[in-house]
Structure formats: structure tokens, C-alpha cells
Image (cartoon, rainbow, N blue to C red):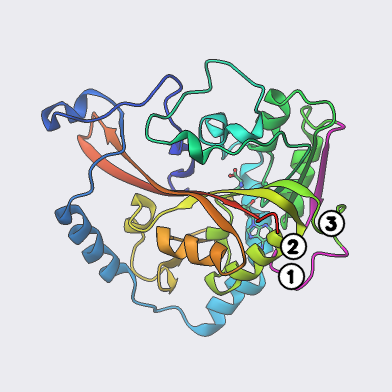
Amino acid sequence: MEENLENTDRRPQFGNRYLEDETEVFEHNAWDDVEWTDELENEAKLKILKNSKITLNSENIHDYENNAHEYWNSFYNIHQNRFFKDRHWLFTEFPELAPNFDAPERVQRDDIKSSQTIDINPESIFEIGCGVGNTVFPILQYNKNENLKVYCSDFSSNAINILKESPEYEKRCHAFVLDVTIDSWNDFVPFQPNSLDIIIIIFVLSAIAPQKASHVIKQCFKYLRPGGLVLFRDYGRYDLAQLRFKPGRCLAENFYVRGDGTRVYFFTQDEVRSIFIENGFKEVQNIVDRRLQVNRSRRLKMYRVWIQGKYVKPQT
Ligand SMILES: C[S@@+](CC[C@H](N)C(=O)[O-])C[C@H]1O[C@@H](n2cnc3c(N)ncnc32)[C@H](O)[C@@H]1O
């Protein structure tokens, strides 16, 4: 089984830790907002040069595209709800999801300006590519608003079945199967255009063929109400997960297939910005989150890169 790099996208619960003295690097398991030197960038570029040659034939590449939902179905068949961990860090990064929740889990990030937090008290939240509910269930737990409706969808029917069977699935939640790349969502979604307060897209756009990403964001724009917000987080260019790919797994530039047939793209900040801006959104936040994770016993340094964004549908 491939190493689970997904679950390491977690911030410490009680504040950030910065590496000021390089000699202390192996004294903790992780450091926040590490400096990215030219040397690191050049090393990363070299690794990508080696793993980016496309050796798969077009039949294989089409199979991964056409049967993407089947590969994810197999993934959830194997891992059930054990792979991804509940994303309790959500409320540090995206306080908008539970504005009245005040608990130690909510850490104030000192690198994020308050102007990047939107004053919104959501009554309708929609998550795309929700998997088995690792985002939805913490929201239902921490946002106590009785009128809140949390819609969530995934194109893996296995994921949706597992989510719906969970004891945490409750009446404020509505889960359904949807492939977000289809031309029109109209016949499949239980809400109207211009109606949603928040749409969440976490580690999902990377699983979609890059040429379809813009269409997905266009649909999000359509269903958000004016003033509504998209919360985005995903893999960044040069993340450890990208550098670790062996040659032969590349499908297109910065787009790879894992051993289990699921795919992953690695974004730059500019790419994320363009996809949203070209579809009418206004940018509130677009940050790169770099973390150094350390394997202290093997004395390994692992650089993680995530892109996080918040985009608003303008009022007019
Ligand atoms: C890396 S997982 C992330 C799951 C969840 N968002 C989380 O953060 O725990 C990617 C998810 O996107 C879903 N997905 C991929 N392509 C999709 C598509 N075209 N339409 C809907 N869901 C999709 C997969 O089934 C999978 O559940």
C-alpha cells in the first residue's frame, strides 16, 4: 500500500512552530512556514524532470479518465473510512465554517490577516468530493446552528454509502452522488442556482483532469449566492507527494496517477488564482502553506506544500 501522505496535512492544535535555528531541525516532528530556498527549488525541479516523462499510452490515460469513479470506488472499498482523518484543523484555516464555535481547537494563525476572514454565518454549505465525510462531520459537530444544511457529494457511490451509514450522519446533512465534471449539475443537485452560502473544495480539484478544473469552478459560481464563498485547499507544486512519484506515473504536466489508479495534480498559486478569477470570482486569500515534516529516527526532512484559497462571488 502507498504511504498515506494525505493525513499529514494537519496543523498542531495549539499554535505554530517556526524553525529559526537549523541545528534544531530534528528536535520536533514538524515546522511551519519554512523558508523555500533556491537550492530546494532546484532539487525539486530536477526530481520532477526525472518523473515527468510520459510513458503511458493514450489508451491507459483515457482509461484513468473514463473510469476515474471506479478507481475511487475501489479505493473506498479497500480503505472504507480509515484513510483520511477528520479535518479538525478546518476551523483554524476556515473559521467561516463555524463562526460561533470557540474552543482550543481553533488556533489563531498569526500569518493570516483578519481581512482574509469573511463575516458569514452560513446556513447552506456544499462540499464537493466529500469522500466519507472527514470534513462534513467536524462541521456538523462544531457548527450548532439548527438551520444549517450541509450538502455533500462525491462521484464514488461507495464513499457516499459509507458516509450515509455513519452514526454521525444526521438530519442537517444531505449526501448524494455527483460527478462534478458533467456538463450541467441541474438534474442532480437538491438546491437552486444562486443559493449556497459556502462551497468547500478540499483535495478534490487535484483529482480531476486539469482541463476540466475551470468547468467545475464555473458550476460553483453558478450555485453560490452573490456574496457566497468558496473555500479551497489542495496540493501545491513541489510537494513531497509530487517529488516521490517514480518515472512512468506521469499523465500530463504535473498530473500523475498513483498505483491504485487515482490521480493527482499539483497546483501553483497562480494557476489556482486564474481558474477562479476567469470564472468571475474575487480573491480573498491565496496562500502557500509550506511545512517541514521530520522523520527523526531516519533523519529525513520532508517538505510539504499546500495551496489554500478563499474566493467570493461578487454581489453584483
Ligand atoms: C483526495 S480525496 C479527498 C476527500 C475529501 N475532500 C477530504 O478532503 O477528505 C478526493 C475525492 O474527490 C472525489 N472526486 C474525484 N473526482 C471527482 C469528480 N469528478 N466528481 C466528484 N468527486 C470526485 C474522490 O472520489 C475522492 O473522494
Indicate the amino acid at tag 3: Val
Indicate the amino acid at tag 2: Lys
- Give whichever of discs 3 and 1 has the lower sequence position: 1
Figure quadrant of residue 186: bottom right
Report if residue 231 is visible in the image: yes
Horizontal arrangement in the rendering, residue 279 relative to residue 237 (left or right): right
On residue 189, the disc is 3
Residue at 85% of width from left, 31% of height from top? 147
Query: CB at mark 1 closer than 8 A to ligand 1?
Result: no
The local secondary structure at tag 1 comes to loop
Tell me the chief SS of the magenta region.
loop
Q: Which residues are magenta?
A: 171-187
Figure quadrant of residue 16: top left
Horizontal arrangement in the rendering, residue 295 relative to residue 143 (left or right): left
Extreme residue in the front direction: 316
Q: What x and y, as percent, mark residue 235?
A: 45, 53
On residue 222, the disc is 2
Indicate the amino acid at tag 1: Ile
Which mark lies nearer to you, 2 or 3? 2
The local secondary structure at tag 3 comes to loop
- Give whichever of discs 2 and 1 has the lower sequence position: 1
Residue on which the image places disc 1:
182
State yes or no: residue 5 in magenta: no
Q: What x and y, as percent, mark residue 312?
A: 62, 52
